[in-house]
Amino acid sequence: MAEKIAIDATKPIPLDDHLCFSLYATSRAIQKLYHDGLSKNKLTYPQYLVLVSLYEYDHVTVKRLGELLSLDSGTLTPLLKRMEKEGLVTRQRSKDDERVVNVKLTDLGTSKRKDINELPEILVAKSNFTADEWNTLEDLSKKLFMNITK
Amino acid sequence: MAEKIAIDATKPIPLDDHLCFSLYATSRAIQKLYHDGLSKNKLTYPQYLVLVSLYEYDHVTVKRLGELLSLDSGTLTPLLKRMEKEGLVTRQRSKDDERVVNVKLTDLGTSKRKDINELPEILVAKSNFTADEWNTLEDLSKKLFMNITK
DNA sequence: AACTATTCTATTTCGCACAACTTAATTTAA
DNA sequence: TTAAATTAAGTTGTGCGAAATAGAATAGTT
């Protein structure tokens, strides 16, 4: 029988006991960790995630990108316009369905793959995690995401 | 002997293999989960974290708040001004050291404690996690934060 | 006391995030 | 086949979040 998760809401709950805060702070810390490697390539963190997505899928629609990154068009449209301006991607309205905009890598965008792919190594090194710790954290984080978004 | 964490940077790394993304997406999903409960009280997520901090410490300086939440004054100053405007906190420059600004709860701010403290229950319920899963995720997230920020 | 360095807050600028809304294209169904 | 509903992207407004800078107050040194 699994133990219940106990939170006593009648007393002040220390910040340190908030799982939400731990994940929030850690996520931001990782973005800071990547900052130098990203700004060297004139990239922001969400722009980096767009490139990662495009290396995986070659071309995607704005809608698909939104599903992949759980970001909406209000975030993606201006972000992609900035990336287009930097010459990293192209945005083209689909001939089949004019509502759809296809996003593709340019040669410049493609050329950054090697640099980009080295960023996770920084986290691996700094984390000082065992493979088991790493995988457990990843699995639990994904499981939590699934459970609260489904 | 612990297994190494293996990342092959020569091939595209699926978005799904990025621990950074999993934590980033999960953190944002939690903020969305809290959104209704927060906006009911006219609060944003970081403002909620400020209140949590104040329930724990009663009064804090801007600097201390920045350390607690790992946020800088560029974020905190306007945020606290908005909270002051809403009547949730007071901001007062210290007599001892005029550089320091003390932040304290008002009665209104204090009165929100019960409502505020119920938010984590929403996450507990939605997570469907065992106490063991919950604690493991919290511990590993904190450990990762410590290792990459120290 | 004057000089220097440090500490702390505030300001500015830019780029997300997200909600709510608008516009335009496509699909559906009456 | 045209009116209604749906879908995709874009727009607007607000609030973070980070970096860089400025500026005032304090502490430390000579």
Image: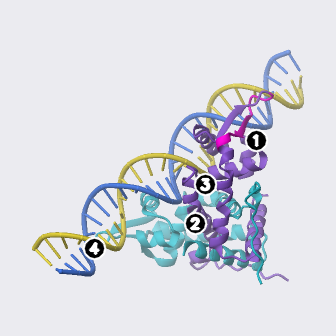
Chain colours: A purple, B cyan, C yellow, D blue
Q: Which residues are magenta?
A: A96-108
Specify whether B58 is left or right of B119. left
Read off the residue under disc 2.
A29
SS for dot 2: helix
Query: Mark 1 or mark 3, which is nearer the start of the sequence?
Result: 3
Name the residue tied to disc 1: A59
Nearest to N terminus: mark 2 or mark 1: 2
Q: Is residue C5 above or below residue A48?
A: below
SS class, disc 1: strand
Q: Which residue is mark 4?
A: B95
The CA span between labels 2 and 1 is 30 Å
**Mark 3 or mark 2, earlier in chain:** 2
In space, the residues marked 3 and 1 are separated at their CA atoms by 19 Å
Most foreground residue, A15 or B90: A15
Question: Which amino acid lies under the numbered mark 2 shown in the image of this protein?
Answer: Ala
Q: Residues within 10 Å of mark 1 (few under 14, many from 20)?
A: some
Tell me where residue B138 appears, x and y as whole percent: 68, 75
How crowded is the residue under tag 2: few (<14 C-alpha within 10 Å), some, or many (20+)? some
Instruction: Name the side, left or right, on which B58 lies relative to A128.
Output: left
**x 77%, y 50%: residue:** A56
Q: Is residue A3 above or below residue C13?
A: below
Q: Nearer the viewer, residue B97 or B87?
A: B97
Which mark is nearer the camera, 2 or 1?
1
Horizontal side of A130 relative to B95 (left or right) equals right
> Which label sits on residue B104?
none
Which residue is tagged 3? A45
Residue drawn 34% across the image and 68% down it: B92
Relative to A118, A28 lies left or right: left
Q: Position of residue D3 (x, y in %)?
A: 79, 22
